[in-house]
Amino acid sequence: MTSTATVILIEDELQIQRFVQAALEEAGFTVYSTDSGKQGVIDCGTRKPDAVILDLGLPDMDGIDVIRQIRSWSHVPVIVLSARTQEAQKVSALDAGADDYLTKPFGTAELLARIRAQLRRQSRAGTATQESIFTIGNIQVDLANREVRRGDALVSLTPIEFRLLAALIRYAGRVVTQRQLLKEVWGPSHIESGHYVRIYMGHLRHKLEADPAQPRYLLTETGVGYRLLTDAD
Amino acid sequence: MNHLRPDPDALLEKLQQEDARQRRGRLKIFFGGCAGVGKTFAMLSAAHARLQEGEDVLVGVIETHGRRDTELRLQGLPQLPLKSLNYRDKTLYEFDLDAALARRPGLLLVDELAHSNAEGSRHPKRWQDVEELCSAGIDVYTTLNVQHLESLNDVVGQITGIRVAETVPDKVFDLADEVTLVDLPPEELLQRLQDGKVYMAQQADRARKHFFRKGNLIALREMALRRTADRVDAQMREYRSDQSIQPVWQAHERILVGLGPGPEAEQLVRTAARLAISMKAEWLAAYVETPALQTLGHAQRQAIVDNLRLAQTLGATTTATLSGDAVSQVLLDYARSRNVSRLVVGKPRRSLFMRLLVPSVTDQLAKEASDIDLHVVVRQPPQRHKPAPQHSLHLAANAHLTGLKKRGYLWALAISATTSVIAGMLLQYFELSNVIMLYLLGVMLISIRYGRGPGILASILSVSAFDFFFVPPKLSFTVSDTQYLLTFGIMLSVALVISNLTSSLRYQAVIANYRERRSLALYEIGKELASTMTTRHIVDVSVHHIASLFQSRAAILLPDADDKLQLPEADHSHGHTLIDIDPGIAQWTYDHQEHAGLGTNTLPSSPILYVPLKAPMRTRGVLAIVPENQAAVFLPEQRQLLDTFAAQIALALERKHYVEVARDALISMESERLRNSLLSAISHDLRTPLTSLLGMADQLRHAGDADPKRQTALDTLYDQAFRMQQLVVNLLDMARLQAGSVQLNSQWQLLEEVLGSALRAMQPVSQQHRILVALPADLPLLQFDAVLLERVFCNLIDNACKYSPPDTTIHISARVHQEEVWITVADEGQGLPAGMETQIFQKFARGQAESSKPGVGLGLSICKAIIQAHGGELWAEDTPPHGTRFIFSLPLGQPPAPPLAEDSPA
C-alpha cells in the first residue's frame, strides 16, 4: 500500500509519536512530527499537509486553539487524539472544526482507516460533482427528489427526518456533534434541545435499520454525536 | 363586604395557636367561689366518667381534707404515689412530677392548682408543674378557688380581710381549655359546713366566724360567677370574630403602667392587669429610674424588681426599666414609641406644701399627655413594716461620697474660719454688705465640692461667724438689726440650692460612670470575643469577664453532637470550677431555652443561675453562675447586662461554629481538588505507556511474521496489553466514582441508542452469543449520563458473555415498573453460586474463586456505583431454569416536551 499523502503529527508524548509515525510511514505517508502546538500550526502552513493528527493534551497550547488557528485558513482534515472520559473535550474539538477523533488507546488499523476516510472525503469534495443519489447498503437516498427507498419499498420520511438524514449524508463517514445537527436541521434557536436529535435519530433507525437496537449505519458515538457509516468505511 | 372577611394573618395566627394547643395537653379547671363548694368532688366524678370511656386516668394528687364523700369518690381511680421530701427534719409528701411525666397518663388529676410546692421541688408552684404536664401533652384536671387568682387576690383580701399567699397567674386561667364553674348557694354551703362536711368540727366553728361569713360567701360567689362569665364572654367574642359575624377589634388598645418605688406599685400592677383583661388589651409595665431613685435601699429596689416580675406573671408583654431625669417625659416618650393608648399611674400621697412646691409626676403627666388617656389610681397602700434601710449596692460609690462628706464638714469649718479672718482684715477697706459676699463665696464652694450637709453647716457657721464678729454688737450673737435675718436666710437657701444641684450632678456622674463601665465591659467582652478563635478561648474570656463584672463564679456548658450538655472540665489554672452544677437543670435550661435555678421560677432553691446562650440559629450552650453577691446579678440593670453578655457569648459560639463549617467545606474542597488532579495525573501516566504499548503491539501484529510462533507471541502480547489497559480503565473508573469526582452529565436519552452503541462496542466479545433486544416501543425518554450507562451495558454484556457458554442467547429487555424503568440483561449460563447475589457487587469478587476467566471483578461494582449515582439500583437474581439476570432500575422523570409533531411526509 503506497500513498504520497503528507500527514502532520502533533503529539507531545514521544513514545506515541514514535509508533504513530512508524505506522504511518510504513503505510506510505510522508510524516512530519512535532511535539508543540505552535510548531504544528507553522508546519501546517509550510508543509501543505493532506491531513493533521493532533493530540488535544499539548503542553504549550490548547488543542482546541490549534484547530481554530488551522481552520482560519485551511480545510485540511484534522483528526484529534483524546483520552477516554473526555467526551466534552472531543465535542468542543469537533465543534471547533476537527473532522474526526480517536480515543486512546487506539490501534494502528483504526487510525489508518480514519485517515483514509478523511482523504477520500476530501478528494470527493474536490471533484465537486455531488451525486444526487446516495447509497448506504440497501438504502437509496435521492437527495434531489427527496425520495428514500429501502430495498424496493419507498420509505416515507417527514421533512425533519429527511433534513436530518441529508445532514448526516453531508458528513458521511465523519462524526457530527449533536450541536451541529441541531443547528443544521432545526436552526440555531434549538441548540439546547438535545433530545430532539435523539428522538428523530430513533425515528430514522426504526424506518431505515433492520434492527434499530443494533444499527449498522446510523451509529451513535456516545457522548459525542452521530456517524453515518457508509459501506466504504 | 370586604371588612367582613377574616384577616388572613389573624386566622393564620389562630390556626398556629390551635396547632400548638393540640400538641399540648388540655387543661380543665374546676373553678369555685371558695373551699367546700365541691370542686374536687366534681373533678373526681368527671374523671370517673372519662375512666368509663376507656381513658387512661391517673390521680396525681388529691386533697380530700378528710371529707367522706370525696374519699368515697376517689375509690376506683388509679393513684400515683406521692413523693416524700425531707425538709427540716420533717417528711413532706408532694406530687411526683417526674413520675407523672414518665408514666404519661391520658388524663391526670392534680388538685389545688394554687398549691405551693415544698422547697427542693422543681417548680415553686404547682401551676408550673401543671404547665409542664400540659406541654408534655398530658391532659390535666385541676381545681381552683377564686381568691387564688392573682388579679383578684387583693380585692378578695380587702373583702374578706384574709389575704392568701398562694396565687395563680390569670393567664393560666385564661389559657385553660375548659373552665367548669362549681357553684353552691351560700346557704347550702353554710349548711354543709354546719354538717361537718367541709371541715372537722372545731375547725368549722372557727371558719364560720372568720372566712365563712355569709357576706363573704356572697361576694366570693359573685366574683367567681363574674370571672367565669368574663371568660365565656371572651370566648363568645372570639367565636364571633372567628365566624366573621362582625369585626370586633378595630384597633388594639395598649396599656402602659408606670411604676414608682412606693408600696402602692403592687396594687397599680394588679389594677392595670384587671383593666387590660376587661379591655382585652395588651399591656406593658415600666419603671423609670431617676438619679434620686438610684439611692434607694436594696429592699426597695428588690420590691421594684418583684413588681415588674409580678407584671410579667400577670400577663404584661413587656417590662422595662427606663432611666432619665424627668419621670413624666420618659414615660410619655416610651408610651408614644410603643403606641400606648392608656397610661396607668398611681397617685402619690404628698403633703399640700410639697404639692404646691413641686408638681407631682401625675400632675405633669396630666398636663403633657394630650394624646394618651390617663388613669390615676388612688389606693391606700397596705401597711407594711418598713424595711431597714440598706445601701444600694451600686452606690458603693455612696461610701465614697460619705467619706467625702466627713472631710467636707471639716472643710466647712476651716473655710468659715478663714473667711472670718480675711473678712476681719478687709473690713477696714470695705462695707459690711460687701464682706458678706466673701462668706457667700465660701458657702458656694463648700456646697459645690462637698454637697448638702457641709454646705448647710458652712452657711450656718458663716452666718454665726458673721453675726458674732461683724454685726454689732460685736462678739455676741445678739442681732440688733433684723435685716441680717434675711442675710442668713439667703445664705442658707444658696447653700441648699447649690448643694442640691451639685449632688444631683454628682449622682448623674456616678450613673454615667456606671453606664460607661457597663458599656465598656460590653465593648471589652465584644472585642475579645471577636478575636477568639477557639471555643476554649471563648469560654475562658466569658468566664473571666462574668466573674469580675458580676462578682460570681461562672462556667459555660457546651452541648455535644447529641445535644447533651457536657460538664466543663475542672480548670485548675483559673480555679473557676463550679463544683455543684446540676446537669439536669442545665439540660432543662438548654432544652427549654429558659432561665432556671436561682432567682427564677424553675428550681429557685438551686444556688446556681442557669442562663441559656441563645443565638439566632439555636441555643449554643448554658451559662451557669454562682453569685457571690446576689445583688450584683439580680438588680434589673445587671440582669439586662447579663442577658446581653449571654447573647454576645452565644453569638461568638455561633460564629465559631460557622467558621468551622466554612473551614471544613474549604478543606473538603481542597482535598477534592487534590484528589482529582492526582487521579488525572495517574490516569495520564498510566495511559500513555499503555497507548504506545498497545499501538506498537498492534502494529507488529498486523505487519505479520513468517514464523507462526512469533506471530502467536505477538497476538498474545497484544491481548495481554489490551487486558492490562481494560484493568487500568476499570481501576481508574472505580477510583473516580469512589472519590465522588464523577459529575453526571445527565440528559434526556433514548435507551435504545445507548444500548445500540454498547452492543457495537461489545461486538468483538459477543460474537459467539446471540443477543436479543426487546424494548417496548413506547419507552419514554430517560434521564441519565449516556457515557456511563453505556459502560454499565458494556460491563453487563461482557459479564453475560463471560459466564454463559457460547451459542446461548443473551436477552436484553426493559419495562416500566411503577415510577421506574427496569432494565434486564439475562444470560443462560450456570447461574450464580448460592448466596453470592450480593457479594458479586463487592470489589474484586467473582462468581468462582479461582477462574480462568479474565477480569478482576471490578466491573459489577462499577456498574452498581454508576446506577446508584443515577438514583437507581442494580441487583442480580437467578433465572429459572438456568442462568442469571441482572436488573437495574432508573427513575422515570418528567421528560421535556417532545418536538412538535409534523405529519406531512417529505
Image (cartoon, coloured by chain):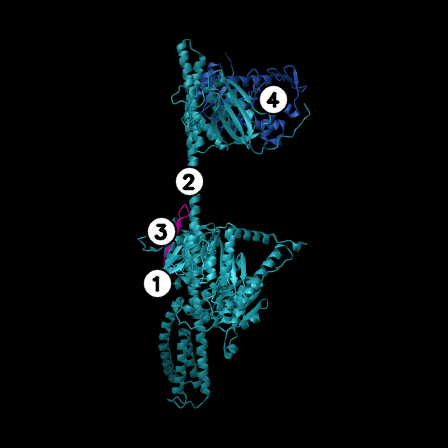
Chain colours: A blue, B cyan
Determine whether label 4 and label 1 are within 8 Å by CB: no
Q: Which mark is residue B278?
A: none
Q: CA distance from mark 1 to mark 2?
A: 60 Å
Residue ID for mark 3: B568
Q: Evaluate whether label 2 is on the same chain as label 3.
A: yes
Instruction: Say which residue appears at 59% left-offset and 15% top-offset.
Output: A137
Furthest toward the top, the residue is B706
Q: What amino acid is at disc 4?
A: His
Bounds of the magenta segment = B549-569
**Chain at tag 1:** B
Residue behind mark 1: B88
- Residue B749: percent from left, percent from top: 56, 28
| Parent chain of label 2 | B
Crowdedness near tag 1: few (<14), some (14–19) or many (≥20) residues, C-alpha within 10 Å = few
Q: Are marks 4 and 3 in contact (CB under 8 Å)?
A: no
> Do callouts 4 and 2 mark residues in contact (Cβ within 8 Å)?
no
Q: Quadrant of residue B578?
A: bottom left
What amino acid is at disc 1? Answer: Arg
| Total numbered badges shown on the rendered structure | 4
Q: Which is more N-terminal, label 1 or label 3?
A: 1
Q: Do the residues at discs 4 and 2 belong to one chain? A: no
Residue at image mark 2: B667
Mark 4, residue position: A206
* Element carrying mark 4: helix
**Sequence-wise, which precedes: disc 2 or disc 3?**
3
Disc 4 crowd rating (10 Å Cα; few below 14, some 14-19, many 20+) is some
Percent from the top left, x then y, of residue B597? 40, 58
**Disc 4 to disc 1, how far (Cα)?**
97 Å
Q: Nearer the viewer, residue B845 or B200?
A: B200
Q: Nearer the viewer, mark 3 or mark 1?
A: 1
